[in-house]
């Protein structure tokens, strides 16, 4: 069964520093991959997604992620952190050919940004 | 336009009681999803509707959980004989329903359920 692992439940960076949030998936068949962000008391918001084609995916708010099949990874990066990036980030996978609704989420990484 | 809304935002109930949680999807979205998010965990899939019918209910944990969407719009998640372990945030999402597996799901803010 598909699983998603996010390394680090809590990541802290300084404002202006690089943000790197890690995500690995388990299946041998590359899934569709998503990053969502959750601000306090708000719903999950899609940052970006990888389906097919270009492995470097650009999303909203300056975030991007690169699909690496050899590493079964889909890490999220942003060159320069802003205070407004403080939130919880979830990586999710959807198995091609499986149920449309059955997004498999990681446990999340809470990002803190220090001034 | 309006996003996905969920009511109530918070619900406190006693063990053994029955609860209903409501989801209003984005207007025109035919696909609707329910997830459950326990403390410290990512969302966990419960059920997915395409129109009025449940296309995939494989995530419902047991027969105490049931969801309906009688007119293909609003959905209600029903939990019978609640247990303390049911305490979680229940998330609803909707998508356009074009039958594309890669379409974006739009999430509501969730209903926080606490079972005492």
Image: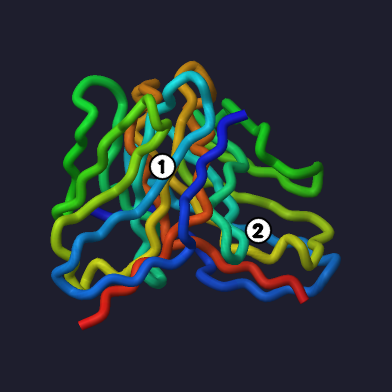
x then y, percent, for residue B10? 56, 73
Numbered disc 1: secondary structure: strand
Looking at the picture, the colour scheme in use is rainbow
Mark closer to the observer (1, 2): 1
Residue at 68 percent across and 72 percent down: it is B114
Q: Disc 1 and disc 2: Cα gap in Å?
A: 18 Å
Q: Looking at the image, which is closer to me, A56 or B43?
A: A56
- Name the residue carrying label 2: B20
- Residue in view at x 27 percent, y 74 percent: A113
- Compared to residue A89, the image places residue B65 above or below, namely above
Q: Please state if A52 lies on the left or on the right of A90 as rendered.
A: left
Residue A66 coordinates in the image, percent (x, y): 26, 37
**B113 and A105: which one is in front?**
A105
Q: Mark 1 lies on which chain?
A: B
Residue B111 percent location from the top left of the image: 54, 64
User: Which corner quadrant of the image does residue B21 belong to?
Assistant: bottom right
Q: Mark 1 points at which residue?
A: B94
Q: Are marks 1 and 2 in contact (CB under 8 Å)?
A: no
A1 or B84, nearer to the observer: A1
Please tell me how crowded label 1 is: few (under 14), some (14-19), or many (20+) other residues with Cα within 10 Å.
many
Identify the residue at horizontal 14%, vertical 53% (top origin): A62
């Amino acid at each position: 069964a598909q699983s998603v692992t996010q390394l680090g439940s809590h990541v802290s960076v300084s404002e202006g520093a690089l943000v790197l949030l890690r995500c690995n998936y388990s299946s041998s068949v590359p899934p569709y991959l998503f990053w969502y962000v959750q601000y306090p008391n708000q719903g999950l918001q899609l940052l970006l997604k990888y389906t097919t084609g270009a492995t470097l995916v650009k999303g909203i708010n300056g975030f991007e992620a690169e699909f690496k099949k050899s590493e079964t990874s889909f890490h999220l990066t942003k060159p320069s952190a802003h205070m407004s990036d403080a939130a919880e980030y979830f990586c999710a996978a959807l198995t091609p050919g499986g149920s449309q609704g059955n997004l498999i989420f990681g446990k999340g990484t809470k990002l803190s940004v220090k001034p | 336009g309006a996003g996905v809304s969920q009511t109530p935002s918070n619900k406190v109930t006693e063990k053994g009681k029955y609860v209903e949680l409501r989801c209003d999807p984005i207007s025109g979205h035919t696909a609707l999803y329910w997830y459950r998010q326990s403390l410290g965990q990512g969302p966990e899939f419960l059920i997915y509707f395409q129109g009025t019918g449940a296309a995939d209910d494989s995530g419902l944990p047991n027969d105490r959980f049931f969801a309906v969407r009688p007119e293909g719009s609003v959905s209600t998640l029903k939990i019978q004989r609640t247990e303390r372990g049911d305490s979680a945030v229940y998330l609803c999402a909707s998508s356009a329903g074009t039958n594309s597996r890669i379409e974006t799901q739009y999430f509501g803010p969730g209903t926080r359920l606490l079972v005492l």
